[in-house]
Structure formats: structure tokens, C-alpha cells
Image (spheres, grey):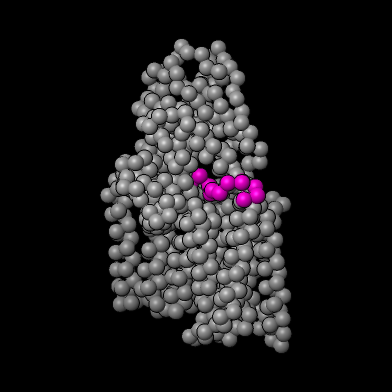
Amino acid sequence: MRRPSPAAKFPLWESALLLLVVLFGALWFLAAERDIAGQRGFPLDDSWIYATFARNLATGHGYSFNPGESLAGATGPLYVFILALFYRVFHDVVWPAKVLGILCLGASSLVVHQTARRILPAGRLAPFLAGLLVALSPTLLWGSLTGLELPVYLLLACLGANLYIREKWTLAVLFWAIGVWLRPDGLFLVLLGLLLRPKISLRNSVAPLIAAASVVGVYFGFNELVGGQILPSSVGVKAHAGLNLGATEWVMFQHWAELWGLSDKGRVGLHAPILLAGMIAGAWLSLRRWPAVVAYAVLFPFAFAAFGSSPGQFDRYIAYVVPFGILLGVVGFDHVANRVMPGHALAALLILGAVCVGWEAHAARIAGIGYGWNVQNINGMQRYIAEDAHKATAPGDTIAVNDVGAMGYFSGCYVVDLVGLVSPRREFPENLRVYRPKFMAIFPDWFQKFGRVDRNTGQVVFYDADSTYKYAPFLGVRLKTNTISARNTMYVYKRMRPGEAGASRISIVEQ
């Protein structure tokens, strides 16, 4: 492999073209959102959790989900502060979050472009191809518009990789450590930066270690201060280390392979399979000089799965490996093209690039339509119920739910989280006894072991722990086309005395 040297200043038109690709990709997703959902929003209920924290912080109600009730319920505290600043200025989070995501993806594509140019200083096409594949990635385009921390963390990860390639170890680890404030699993990348680099010694390890310990230590302290534990409560709810390890690792492998175009489900993969072949070659060539980049691209999903966590909707929890994999893939393409077809290396690289770009463009078209349905699902189910609850309740009323985001943002109620992200984790009937919610909106099969059939109505009802109240269903909201929700139908229950008669027929609203 050619030795890296200081990157030449790349042409302005390349930067402009990369930014235009990101913009046009985002516009396609936003157009699908407008046409399918009809109302702007987010493709995940989790996005509204951040929005609720940010609004409360911006309006003087503290770092809280329910106003004034401090807790470490947001996975990325730094992202809450960023959104709170936007809300303070714009009194809205939807458009500011989307614009921020687009800008971060554009910046990430430029950083990857520059990083590839530093690795391949003589490359005429490969560096631009690396930036282009990041800009057009369906996974990253989807993530940039979710309203989540994904695009901001992605940019920090890419900046750290650029500094790592340039052998600026302390700054690289510092950027990756800041990323922990957005994604706790960023600790894995921090550890790789500390442990995996050429010519490592005790002397050149002190500064990176101090930088990482300082930033991560403050992060732990913040969580302890606001929530009484060093990690956000969402980590405890979603992570289950060591449980059924073989099965979780196999599921993760399937998702990781699908991320690189290898799907056994008859679906179009998100990136061209040929890119995976290039990534393997690039990983072999880069392992000695940049081991952390290689280790993160290949091992992070499996380290994540070791804690019992799923890859998330649209593989969002492992999407951060995409720019690392693309970098390695382009390095592999460049090397193979120059070794196999030295006289026609540029043409070979152009063909490989065209295949990858065409594949991503096709996958992005499909993903954009899916994104539109994702937003429609959240608006049509969780947001619809929340806005309906706002009309049917008074200030101070309580509602219990298993999806808290939109309910917290739109209902105006005190929200009891039956899953435990933003409320203390208790048994389902005990939560009902403690809070006595006026309404409950749930997927009933999640709590089926607590349900009983009402002999008078034939409906499944729920009782609180001391049987003071029962909760009977009266409304269901059903998605005609479900692409993101855990269930097709969410049911709304009303609190009543055990002797009261509930509805024998449930009204179903189809969305």
C-alpha cells in the first residue's frame, strides 16, 4: 500500500457535489414524508423522547421527561442540550433536528473524503468515491432525518477517524470520548483508540487516557447526578449482557451482513455486496497501520450484541460502522485495481464505483419510501393517541403507556412508562396501583400475563395491584401499513371501578 502523506487540497467542486448529493437524497426522503405521512414528524417514537427532554429543559422544567422530575432517561445527554438550544431559539425541534442531521451527514461525507485522500494521496477517484458512498448511504440518509443523535455521533466518529489516521491520537480519542455523551456504546471506540494503535507505549498513552477519562468521567458524573446511576436508564432497559449470547450474535451477524448487501430474506441490501469484498481487502491492508478503524468496522456490532442489544430499527444502532467500512472498501478497491489492472486501474475503479453508487441509489429510493411510512406510523398511532388524550384529559391527569415519546410531547399528561425508560421499573399492576392513571395506551400482548377476561364484555381487562380499579379497552388504533411499530394495533384503556361495565365492542380507528 502507498504510504500516506499530507492530503492535498481537494477541488471545491468535489465538496460541492458531495453536499448536493446529501441534499438531494434528503429531499427525496422529505418528499416521501410529505406525500405519505402528510404531516411532518419523526420515524421513531424514541425521537419524541429527546424532543420532550429538550422542550422541558428549554422551558425551565429541568433535565426531565415529566416536567420537574429529574432522571437520566435520555441515551445522549449532549443531544438533549443541542435540541434544547434549538427549541429555545425556534420553539420547535422537528425542522431544526432534521436540518442538523442533514448538515452532519454532509460534513461526515466531506471528512471521509478528506480521510480517504490522506490514505490514498495519489488516488484520482477513490477518495471522492468514499465521500460519495457516505453521502448516498440509505442507512445514513434515513438516520440523518430521524431526530435522533445518530448523525451527530456519526460526525464525531468520522472526525476521530480522520485524526486517528493522521496519528493525532489524543485528539482522536477526545472526539470519540465526546461521542459517549451521545452514544454510551461509543466507549468501545474509545477503548479501541486507547489500545489499538502503532508504536503504542506508556509514554504516548498518558495524554489520550487523561483526555478520555476526563470526558467520560464527567459523563458518568452527570448521569449519577440526574438519575442516580452512571449510565442512562435506557441502557439498563435495553441491554441484557450474556443472555442467550449465541442467538443474539447470530441475529447481529445477519443484520451486519444485510447492511453490506447480503440478505437471505429476498430484500435489497443497503450497500452493494462488492463493497464488502473491498472492505475485507482494505481491512487486511490497513490492519497494521490503523487497527482501531478495522476493529471498529468489523467487531463493533458483535461487541454490541454481547450486551443482548438488537441492531434496532433500520440497523440504527450499528449504522456507525458504515463510514469505516466504506473507507476500508475504497482502500481495497484502489489496491486491487492497481494490482490487477495497473494500466486500467482508473477504469476498473470507475466500474466498481458505479456498481456501488447505483446500488445505493436504488436502495435509497426504497428506503425513502419506507421512511415516509415510518413517519406516518408514528403520527398515525402514538401521536394520534397522544393528541386525542390531550383533548380528553385535564392538567395533572396521568396516562400509562409502553411507548412514551409522542405521548410525553403531545398529551399534556403526566406519563407513566410501563417499560421503565423514564419511570421506575415496577411490575405492571404495581405501576397501576402507584399512579392510578386515568388512561392507558398499550400493546396488550406485552402484558398478557396480567390480563383477565371480563365475563360481562368478553374483553381482556387489567387490574391494579390492589384491585381498586380495572382498566377496560374502548379504542384501538390500527395501522393499515405498518413498517416501524412493534404491533399493528395499540389499544386505549379507561380506568373504572371493578363493578362498572366496560365496552363490549371496541372502536377501531384505521390509519
Q: Is residue 175 above or below residue 344?
A: above
Q: Nearer the viewer, residue 350 or 102?
A: 102
The residue depicted at 30 percent of the width and 77 percent of the height is 203
Task: Tell me the quarter of the image containing the C terminus.
Answer: top right
Q: Nearer the viewer, residue 100 or 403?
A: 100
The residue depicted at 40 percent of the width and 29 percent of the height is 394
The residue depicted at 60 percent of the width and 25 percent of the height is 507
Locate residue 480 relative to residue 417 in the image: left or right. Answer: right
Confirm whether residue 266 shows in the render. Answer: yes
- Return the residue found at the far bottom: 343
Q: Which residues are magenta?
A: 34-46
Tell me which corner region of the image, top left, top right, bottom left or bottom right, holds residue 418.
Answer: top left
Magenta region includes residue 212: no
Task: Tell me the quarter of the image containing the N terminus.
Answer: bottom right
The percent coordinates of residue 302 (x first, y second) are 51, 56
The percent coordinates of residue 281 (x first, y second) are 61, 73
Locate residue 282 relative to residue 363 in the image: left or right. Answer: left
Locate residue 356 relative to residue 304 in the image: left or right. Answer: right
The residue depicted at 39 percent of the width and 41 percent of the height is 422
